[in-house]
Image (spheres, helix red, strand yellow):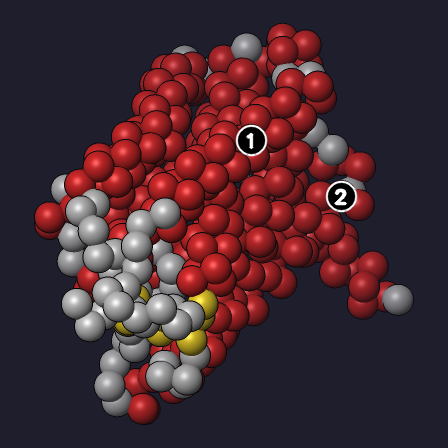
Amino acid sequence: MEDANQTGPIHFHFRPFSQLPEVQVLIFVTFLIMYVVSVSGNTSISLIIGTSRSLHTPMYFFLASLAALEICYSCTIAPLTLASVLSPEKTLISLPGCAAQMFFFIFLGSADCMLLAAMAYDRFVAICHPLRYALLMSWRLCAQLALGSLVLGFISAVQLTILIFRLPFCSSKEVGMFYCDILPVMRLACADTRVHEATLFVVGVTVLTIPFLLIALSYVFIVAAIVKMRSAEGRHKAFSTCSSHLTMVLLQYGGGSLIYLCPSSSYSPERGQVVSVVYTFITPMLNPLIYSMRNRELKDAVKRAMRRFLSS
């Protein structure tokens, strides 16, 4: 009753990773390095694709779009996380601020998942229907797929953010995570959240399961087409391109599924923190590294850009 009667502004603070200052400093340095690598790497990917005419193809258009999403995604989570790691008790976030962070987290994360499905379709057309690729993957369709990913992500974010922040929050409390994630914030509400948990599961199935099944179906046809290729060089190039995309799919969808498709009763804040680090810090950092190392055309474009930079 004492909590319920509080009428002042509500603020949250984030759970520290450790109570030891030395460990917190080590985590801060690690996160800072990953954040800098993520933003600089994805920015470089976007600029190189934008300035290299040889990379103005649908595949690289989607890759540049993914890199732009990863930049925004990292900037939504990392700055506040870094501040809270250094001073957990002093870094507070208001209820509207928490809602804003959650909105952009859901929006960008959902759009990321949808865009990975669009990239799988692009690879399916390129490998299974190479002669019709230019006709099927028109720039208009590419723009529609990218815009559709953003629209679906926006709709998911609006629905879940409004649903959760209409709940009553009785007092200032600790969020059992390093950012305003859905389940930890929902657990701070002083009301019955069973309907909200069911809605979250339905949205999770829509955003994670359906696109993942489409990606899996695309790869069934892709693998069948690659196996039939007579050229060893063609098979190697196809596997190299697809393995980069498939790695990102497993990291993104695997982490999201462990959090949002498991029963809320089995949710563990400790496990949630570890899994969330994967898709909020590690995946955005690995995106440019994986694609630049596994893709010859992109590696050549990076080398040309480096030579131009050094010569100037």
Measured as percent of width and height from the top left, residue 34 is found at 48, 67
Residue 171, can we see it? yes
To which residue does mark 2 refer? 50
In this view, the residue in front, 99 or 72, is 99
Please tell me which residue is depicted at 78% across the width and 60% down the height of the picture. 307
In this view, the residue in front, 24 or 179, is 179
Q: On the rendered structure, is 96 left or right of 167?
A: right
Q: Farthest right residue? A: 312
Please tell me which residue is depicted at 55% across the width and 23% down the height of the picture. 122
Q: State the mark number for residue 151.
A: 1
Q: Quadrant of the N terminus?
A: bottom left
Residue at disc 2, secondary structure: helix
Q: Residues at badges 1 and 2 in contact (C-beta under 8 Å)?
A: no
Measured as percent of width and height from the top left, residue 38 is found at 54, 61
Task: Tell us which disc is closer to us: 1 or 2.
Answer: 1
Q: Farthest left residue? A: 265
Measured as percent of width and height from the top left, residue 73 is found at 52, 53
| Quarter occupied by residue 36 | bottom right
The amino acid sitting under disc 1 is Val
Please tell me which residue is depicted at 35% across the width and 84% down the height of the picture. 89
Marks 1/2: CA–CA distance: 23 Å
Count residues near mark 2 (Cα–Cα under 10 Å), then give few for <14, some for 14-19, many for 20+.
some
Q: Is residue 182 above or below residue 118?
A: below
The amino acid sitting under disc 2 is Gly
Q: On the rendered structure, is 67 left or right of 224?
A: right
In this view, the residue in front, 49 or 204, is 204
Q: On the rendered structure, is 39 left or right of 3?
A: right
